[in-house]
Image (cartoon, rainbow, N blue to C red):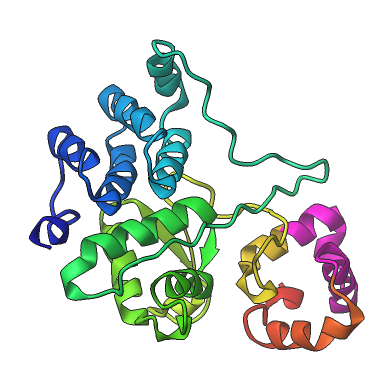
């Protein structure tokens, strides 16, 4: 456990990451793939590529995602020396400008504790890399489903919030504060080298898990200049159509507008 506990507490060099990437522990290899992205060197990219054929599916997925997030010119240079294919594109933009939402693949995670902060940081970073911009509640639900499959709400919110702050200190993630200062429930999180807002389809997200900034951006995309001159009723109608909300679901939308999206129609 000592090896794991110290994983994210220091700045690891390539030799250490390479050692972890060769570990018999698939979780160590998975975490190494996440950290190699932060190095971004030719050596790191080459090692990431080797992990795309790892025996563990989660390691392969983390390595493929990491390659997409590295400098693509450097990736191309490294892969040009290998008989390989280019990393697949994560998302495609639809005709209407709305991208596909790609969900994080839930994998078994250890219960967060002081002894495994390295693993908590790795998982939180991986979720944000995959789904960001992502709301705090969805991050908590995904992590909870992975660590507490029988009762996701048992997730210790304070430990996840602290993990986010550690990642922010490392300059890897950032958040938009929606309402109350200091509460992850009202944060929208994203990778620092990625946009704060991306317009996507709903995907597997609950309506309440779609960032309000994303909803506003989608309304502006659909309404154009009319958005600034529109009233609440008009915006509400466009909102219902955009997310294919049925009449029977209106009570759900009403609850969301009263809470998560409370300022949406009056922006």
**Boundaries of the magenta span:** 218-244
Residue 156 is one of the magenta-drawn residues: no
In the image shown, does 183 or 93 lie closer to the viewer? Answer: 93
Left or right relative to 186: residue 59: left
Which residue is pictured at 51% across the width and 79% down the height? 179
Q: Residue furthest left?
A: 2
Residue 227 is one of the magenta-drawn residues: yes
Q: Which quadrant would the C terminus be assigned to in this image?
A: bottom right
Which residue is pictured at 42% across the width and 17% down the height? 79
- Spot occupied by residue 170 in the image (x, y as percentages of width and height): 26, 53
Query: How many dots with numbers?
Result: 0
Does the magenta stretch mainly form a helix, a strand or a loop?
Answer: helix
- Spot occupied by residue 171 in the image (x, y as percentages of width and height): 31, 51
70 lies above or below 201 = above
Q: Quadrant of residue 20?
A: top left
Q: Quadrant of residue 22?
A: top left
Left or right relative to 7: residue 170: right
Q: Is residue 42 visible?
A: yes
150 lies above or below 235 = below
Which residue is pictured at 45% across the width and 74% down the height? 140
Q: Quadrant of residue 74?
A: top left
- Spot occupied by residue 1 in the image (x, y as percentages of width and height): 12, 63
Q: Is residue 132 visible?
A: no
- Spot occupied by residue 230 in the image (x, y as percentages of width and height): 87, 69
230 lies above or below 68 = below
In the image shown, does 172 or 45 lie closer to the viewer? Answer: 45
């Amino acid at each position: 456990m000592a090896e794991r506990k110290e994983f994210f507490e220091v700045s690891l060099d390539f030799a250490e990451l390479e050692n972890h990437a060769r570990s018999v522990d698939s979780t160590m290899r998975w975490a190494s793939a996440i950290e190699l992205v932060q190095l971004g060197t030719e050596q790191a990219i080459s090692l990431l590529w080797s992990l795309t054929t790892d025996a563990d599916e989660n390691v392969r997925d983390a390595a493929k995602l990491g390659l997409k997030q590295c400098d693509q010119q450097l990736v191309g240079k490294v892969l040009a020396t290998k008989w390989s294919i280019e990393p697949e594109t994560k998302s495609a933009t639809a005709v209407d400008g709305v991208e596909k939402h790609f969900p994080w693949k839930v994998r078994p995670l250890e219960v967060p504790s002081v002894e495994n902060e390295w693993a908590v940081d790795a998982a939180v970073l991986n979720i944000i890399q995959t789904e960001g911009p992502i709301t705090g509640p969805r991050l908590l639900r995904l992590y909870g489903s992975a660590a507490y499959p029988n009762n996701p709400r048992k997730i210790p919110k304070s430990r996840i919030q602290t993990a986010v702050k550690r990642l922010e200190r490392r300059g890897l993630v950032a958040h938009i504060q929606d309402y109350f200062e200091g509460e992850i429930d009202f944060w929208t999180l994203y990778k620092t080298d990625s946009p704060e807002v991306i317009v996507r389809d709903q995907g597997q997200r609950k309506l309440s898990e779609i960032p309000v900034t994303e909803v506003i951006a989608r309304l502006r995309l659909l309404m154009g200049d009319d958005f600034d001159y529109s009233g609440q009723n008009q915006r509400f109608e466009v909102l219902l159509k955009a997310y294919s909300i049925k009449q029977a679901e209106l009570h759900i939308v009403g609850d969301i507008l009263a809470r998560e999206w409370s300022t949406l129609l009056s922006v």
